[in-house]
Amino acid sequence: MILVTGFQGYGGRSANPSERVARALDGSRIGGARVQARILPVDFAAVCRLMPDMIDAEGPRLILSLGLWPGEPMLRIERMASNWSWFELPDNAGHRQNGRVIADGPDGYLTTLPADAMQAAVRAAGLPCRQSGSAGSYLCNATAYVTLHHCAQRHPATHAGFIHLPYLPAQVAELQDQIAIDGAVEAHQRADYASMHLDDMLTGVRAALAAAWTESQAQAT
Ligand code: PCA
């Protein structure tokens, strides 16, 4: 089974493309594996509890978590999860985690998904994709860290990783309206206008998952 997670909205945004992509993939099959989607709250304490419980209960072979990175113009495969949180925004429970994700955990983990093969597959599907060395210091990084830590300790055969997604076009249209209403900065100062259509995100994430699944099967045999 492939577990795909998305996030609820946060930071005053009603939508999160990661939730839309995860929901659209729920119940589908990739390379013969069933995809199960779960939507996570943007809540540090809840994610630290839910993610390990879900992995223990459902035993996925592969885990791909998705999140929004405002301003990102393409699919962004995260290579690293670091044991450091610095929440510039409170999470949806009002908490700001400033310090380690897990007090006695190692400083970081590398993704156990085949990032190069996934990137190549997304680009071969005609969509832009890159890799990044930092998933930030908010909930997405914490989720990737908690997941990789739990897998390292209890589920060494489970491969896990994270992809950040751009805004949906409608979100940027809304943002532009809001910027005009606020009248606080010139529109051209903003660097967060990039967006991608939901269908393209879905095509890209499916291609990345297919590549990751193929590689995980090859390693298992
Ligand atoms: N993006 C945030 C958290 C939830 C999401 O979708 C992040 O990049 O940490």
Image (cartoon, helix red, strand yellow):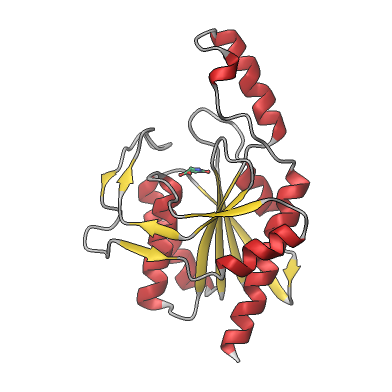
Q: Quadrant of residue 156?
A: bottom left
Q: Is residue 37 above or below residue 16?
A: below
Q: Is residue 73 above or below residue 6?
A: above
In the image, taking residue 101 as reference, residue 74 lies left or right, namely: right
**Front one among 200 and 189:** 189
* x, y percent for residue 152: 38, 74
Count how many numbered circles sit on residues in the image: 0
In what quadrant of the picture does the C terminus appear? bottom right
**Front one among 53 and 186:** 186
Q: Quadrant of residue 172?
A: top right
In the image, taking residue 116 as reference, residue 86 lies left or right, namely: left
Residue at 43% in and 77% down: 155
**Front one among 195 and 40:** 195
* x, y percent for residue 217: 63, 83
**Front one among 182 and 118:** 118
* x, y percent for residue 115: 56, 65
Residue at 70% in and 40% down: 196
* x, y percent for residue 140: 46, 49
Residue at 71% in and 49% down: 201
**Residue at the bottom extreme of this rendering:** 221
